[in-house]
Amino acid sequence: MNTQMSLTEALSQSGLESIDYVILFTYLIMLVSLGVFLSFNRETKNTNDYFLAGNTLTWWAVGASLIAANISAEQLIGMAGTAYADGIAIAAYEIMAAIALLLIGKFLLPIMMEQRIFTMPQFLRKRYNSGVGLAFSILWLFLYIFINLTTVAWLGALAIEQIMGLQGLIIEMGFFHISARIIIIIALFTIAGLYSIHGGMTSVAWTDVMQVVFIIGGGLATAYYALLAVAGDDGSISEGFQKLCNFAIDREYAKDDHFHLIIQESHNASAYDNVPGIAAIVGGLWLTNLCYWGFNQYITQKGLAAYSIHEAQKGFLFAGMLKILMPFIVLIPGICAFYITQYGDTNLQDTIKVSDEAYPWFIKNFMPTGIKGLSFVALAAAVISSLASMLNSTSTIFTIDIYRKYINPEASDRKLVVMGRTAAILALIIALISAAPLLGELDQAFQYIQEYSAFLYPGIAIVFGLGLLWKRASGTAAIWITILTLPLGIIFKFIFPSVPFQFRAGYVFMILLILFVTISLNSKKVIPSQSILKAAQDLMKRWGYIMGGVAIASVVAATIVSCSMLLLPSDTTPEDNVFAYLNDIGFQAFYFFGFLAGACALLCLSNARSPYQDSKALPINMALFSTTRGYTYGALSVCIVSLIIYIILW
C-alpha cells in the first residue's frame, strides 16, 4: 500500500482548499501560543493558582469558559446527529440547561464558594465523611476518563476524519498500522495538553474566551449556509426557513416529530426513548442538568475560580443566555441534512451512514471555501476546549482528593502541581487506549453519554443537593445512597429495558430520596439547630408550603392521568382523547416532578422548624441567596424566551 498516495488522494476528495487549511492552522497556532504564553506569563505559585486560576476570573471569562467546556463534539456532532435522526426535541437539553444554570447560580454556587473548596468530592468529605468523598472521587475519575474524554475525542476525530476524506484510512508506520482516526485523537489530545497541562485553569479559562468566539461564530456560519442549502440556488435564509416549515406541514406536521419539542410515543417510539415527551420539562432531564451544571467538577470549577460570588453568578447568567442560542447552532445543520437527504440533491459526496455523520457531511458538501475552514475551526475549538477542561478537572480531583488525602498528605504545593500535570498525562493515555473499544459501533454518541451518566445522576443529585441545602442530611444516608445508586440503576435497566432512561433515572431518584430522608431523620448524630432569624424562618416556611402544594398536585395529577388509561376504551387514540394524549407525551414524569418539589418542601420546612441538625450540617445563611436586580431581570428574560420557544414548537 502506498500510504503517501492514499493519504494524498483522500485529502484531495475532502473539498478543503488551501485557504481552509491556512485558517485551521492559524487558529491552532493562536490557541497554543496563547495557552503557552498564559502558562508561562503567570507564575504558578500554589495549588490555588493551578487549579482555580488564583480566583481571578471575571464574569465574562466564567460564562465563556462554561460554554466552551460544554459545547464540544458531543453537541456539534452528537446533537446534530440526533436532530437528523429524531428531530429538534433534543434541544430540550440546551433550553432547560439555561434555566438550570440560573437556579444553580442563585442557590447552589454561593454555598460552594462560601465553603472555599477546590473539588466536589472535597465538599463531600467536609459535609459527610471521607468514605463518601473517596467514592465520588473514583466515580468522577471513571466518568471523565472512560465516558467524557473518550467520547469527545472520538466524536471530534470522526467528524474531522469525514471532513478531510480520511474515513477508513490506515497509515503504515514501520511495522505498525494505525487508523487515521486514532492519529487525529492523538493530535487533539496533544494540542489540548500542550497548554492545559502546564498552565492549569489559568490557561484553560482564558483560552476558552477566545475559543467560544470561534465556536459561536463558526456555528452560526454553518447554520447560515445550512439554510441557504435548503433554499437552493440563489435562495435566501428566509426561503430556506420557509421550505423547512412547508416540509414539516407537508409531512403531516401533527405526526412528524422532527419539528416538535415534545415527542409523542405513538408517533416516534425511538425518538421518545431519547427525549420522552414532557419529561424533558418536568422529568429526569432535571437530574442531568442539575448534576452536569451544578455538581460536575469541570463545569463547577469555572465558577469556583471567579473572584467573587456575584461575579460567578453573572458568569452563570451569561452562560444561560448563550445556551438559548446553542440549539440554533447545533441543530439546524442536522435538521437541514435530514431535509436535503429527503428532497434535496442526491448527487452528493458520500452518504450519511450513521446519524453522527450528519454535521461533518454537511460541512463537506455545502460550506464554501474559507467558510468551510471557519466551520472546521469551530469544531476543533469545541473539541479542544472541552478536552482541556476535562483534563484540568481530572488532574484536580486526583491530586486534591486522592494523592494529597491518601498518598502524600505532606506534599508541598509544588509537588501537588507536578502530580496534577502527571495525572493529566496518564488520563490522556488511558482515554486513548479506551476510545475505540468503547465507542467503535455507536450510532448516536450523545445518547451514550446521557444514558450512562444517568445511572449515576440520581444519587449525585440527592447526596450533593440535600447535603448543600438540608441541615438533617446525614453521612450514613449519603454512604447508602453512594453504594446503591449504580446497582439500582442497573437493576432497573435489566427489569425495564424498554422504559426510556430518563424515566428510569426518575424512578431510581424517587426510591433513593425516600431512603435518604428516612435514614437521615433517624440519625442519632445530631446537635441542636443553630438559631435562625424569624424572617428567614417565615420565608422558608412559606416556600415549603408552596412547594408542598406543587408536590401534592403533581403526584395527584400524574396518578389521575395514569389510572385513566384503565377506564378508556381500547380503541382510544391520543388524537381523540386528552388523557390518552397526556399519557402519550409521558405525563407520568410528573411523579418525578412531585418528588423533586417534595424534596424542596421538606428541606425548607425542616430547616425552619426542626430543633436538630446533622453534626456536620452547613450554616444556614439566607443572605447567600440574594442576587442583584440585573441577575433577576436577566433570569426572567431567559425564562420568558424559553417559554416562547416551547409554545411555538410544542
Image: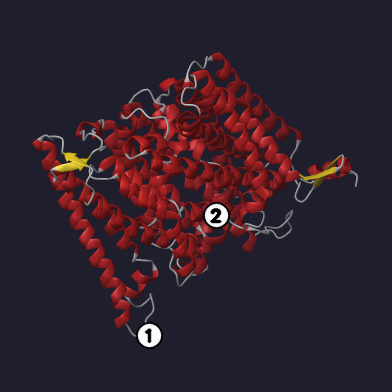
Identified at 71% across, 58% down, the residue is 351
Residue 448, disc: 2
Identified at 16% across, 43% down, the residue is 612
Tag 2: residue type? Tyr
The secondary structure type at the circle numbered 2 is helix
Compared with residue 153, is residue 568 higher up or lower down, i.e. above or below? below
Q: Is residue 233 visible?
A: no
Say whether disc 2 or disc 1 marks the residue closer to the N-terminus.
Answer: 2
In the drawing, does residue 312 fall left or right of residue 544?
right
Q: Quadrant of residue 377?
A: top right
Residue at the disc numbered 1: 570
Identified at 29% across, 39% down, the residue is 107
Residue 525, disc: none
Compared with residue 177, is residue 269 higher up or lower down, i.e. above or below? below
Badge 2, how many Cα within 10 Å: few under 14, some, many 20+?
A: some
Badge 1, how many Cα within 10 Å: few under 14, some, many 20+?
A: few
Most distant residue in the left direction:
534
Q: Nearer the viewer, residue 642 or 596?
A: 596
Residue 489: percent from the left, percent from the top? 44, 59
Residue 526: percent from the left, percent from the top? 20, 42
Residue 120: percent from the left, percent from the top? 41, 37
Tag 1: residue type? Ser
In the drawing, does residue 482 fall left or right of residue 10?
left
Q: Nearer the viewer, residue 85 or 114?
A: 114
Placement of the C terminus among the 4 image quadrants: bottom left
